[in-house]
Amino acid sequence: MILQIKHAHLLTQRVSIKTYKMTKLTKKQKKDQSKEGGSNAGEYPNVKVFCGPDGGAPEGTYPVNTIKRGKSAIKLAHNAPNPEGIINCVYGHYPSLKAQRESKKSKK
């Protein structure tokens, strides 16, 4: 989809907008979203590896199928009931992240 945006002080710009397919959530997933650390429960239908349950968060939270998502899970772990569980789970999947963290700590 292409939209044209016009502002008085700017030239006409074209912006491309991606459309995302919304997934239907089950009753359990909706209930899990209200739990601590579960706001995105059920939002990752194509992901198989999660660290949420290790941190006390609902199933289907804190995906770690890529290193980028692993880094994100570490940053967002403070929202879970047991953040250390999520961090340890991520380090289990990506030991290189643990090495990076330790090297940063030693430089300080």
Image (spheres, grey):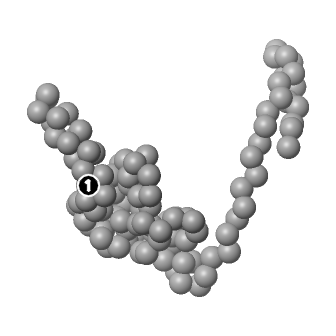
Expressed as whole percent of the image width and height from the top left, the position of residue 21 reads 72, 61
Residue located 57% across and 65% down the image? 46
> Which element type, helix, strand or loop, lies under badge 1?
helix
Query: Is residue 62 positioned above or below 60 on the image?
Result: above
Expressed as whole percent of the image width and height from the top left, the position of residue 97 reads 27, 45
Query: Is residue 100 positioned above or below 75 on the image?
Result: above
Expressed as whole percent of the image width and height from the top left, the position of residue 40 reads 52, 64
Residue located 28% across and 62% down the image? 89
Residue located 26% across and 55% down the image? 91
Q: Please, which residue is most extreme toward the left here?
A: 106
Q: Is residue 72 visible?
A: no
Location of residue 108 (image quadrant): top left
For label 1, the residue is 91
- The answer to which of 60 and 34 lies nearer the viewer is 60
**Which residue type does callout 1 highlight?**
Tyr
Q: Quadrant of the N terminus?
A: top right
Location of residue 30 (image quadrant): bottom right
At label 1, counting other C-alpha atoms closer than 10 Å, the crowd grade (few under 14, some 14-19, many 20 or more) is some
Number of numbered labels in the structure image: 1
- The answer to which of 36 and 40 lies nearer the viewer is 40
Q: Please, which residue is most extreme toward the bottom here?
A: 27
Residue located 22% across and 47% down the image? 98
Location of residue 11 (image quadrant): top right
Position of 73 with respect to 3 (left or right) is left
